[in-house]
Image (cartoon, rainbow, N blue to C red):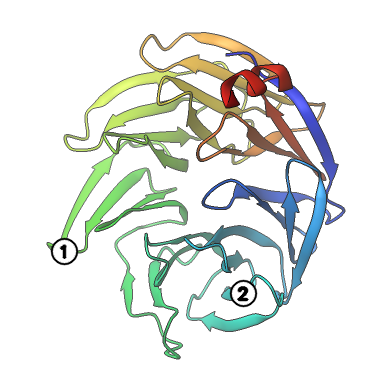
Amino acid sequence: MDLVAKRSINCEQGAVRAVRYNVDGSYCLSCGSDKKIKLWNPRTGLLLKTYGGHADEVMDAAGSCESSYIVSASLDKSVIYWDVSTGLPVRRLRGHAGGVTCIRFNEESSIAVSGSKDNTVACWDIRTRKLDAVQTMREAKDCITALVVSEHKIISSSLDGSIRQYDIRAGELVCDTIGVPITYLVQTRDGQCLLAACSDGTIRLIDNDSGELLAEYKGHRVDDYTIECGIIAADTKIISGSAEGAAIVWDLLEGKEVRRLRIGSEVVHSLAPHPTGNDILFARKRHLEVWGKPEEDEEELIE
């Protein structure tokens, strides 16, 4: 698990709230407190486009499956659907009563799913001109913090300490209560497990079907920040940001810490593993950091 710092990009957009790869990892997005989204080539550090149109901080963004559209979530209570090439908003969706904290596309990018401080999850049919949400889930008792969207499921985490799985085809809801505010949620690539970052400084691995707690990972500092986590190395390692300017890697099965990456002096709060390769994006204050395997290792892999 040899990772080195490859590139540091000053995003120049106030504090970077989130970093995200597009579907194939060829470009990435940074969401800023300056109300803008920036599109980058992470291999060269080149700024490709800036998207401005929100009236408050941008908290999350996602690229569509063919990489020609972006959806973004902002504290201005709106979701914007952008045309990547023109840089212009195609549609502005307002229906949340509070700031929008997280956003995802479904697999064919026909539906955008957003989570908000108003405790709701909303589904938007972005291919039509319909401006109202086609479905709104109101079961959560506190802010929605993260979403996992698959072919027929929407999974949400909330500060109320529960993970809710909505089966769209069956019209069923399964709720697993952890009892501690959940600040971030990701799913393993095989879809078997969920990884929940919690405000008590523990990351919990949960069986997707049974809701059983499989493992816990500790050693990172959260303080009062929302710190994201991820699953890397073909579902064998867990990684999380940390408040002391580091990223910590654990072995998924054994639960023990295997690596501590010194990213910088500021809080490392957002991260994004490359969808197919080994690189990982980290956000700290104004910077987007690209880490990965040393270049010579990559050349060997390509050969």
* Residue at 55% in and 9% down: 258
Q: Is residue 9 above or below residue 94?
A: above
* Residue at 65% in and 27% down: 242
**Between 69 and 228, the one nearer to me in the picture:** 69
Residue 221: image location, x then y, percent? 62, 24
**Between 265 and 97, the one nearer to me in the picture:** 265
Residue 113: image location, x then y, percent? 42, 65
* Pointer 1 residue: 169
Q: Is residue 113 above or below residue 7?
A: below
Q: Is residue 249 above or below residue 241?
A: above
Horizontal side of residue 198 vs 81, given as left or right:
left
- Asked if residue 262 shows in the view, the reply is no
Tag 2 secondary structure: strand
Labels 2, 1: front one: 2
Say few, some or many: other residues with alpha carbon within 10 Å of mark 1 (under 14 / 14 to 19 / 20 or more): few
Residue 201: image location, x then y, percent? 52, 26
**Labelled disc at residue 258:** none
* Residue at 32% in and 46% down: 163
Horizontal side of residue 137 vs 54, given as left or right:
left
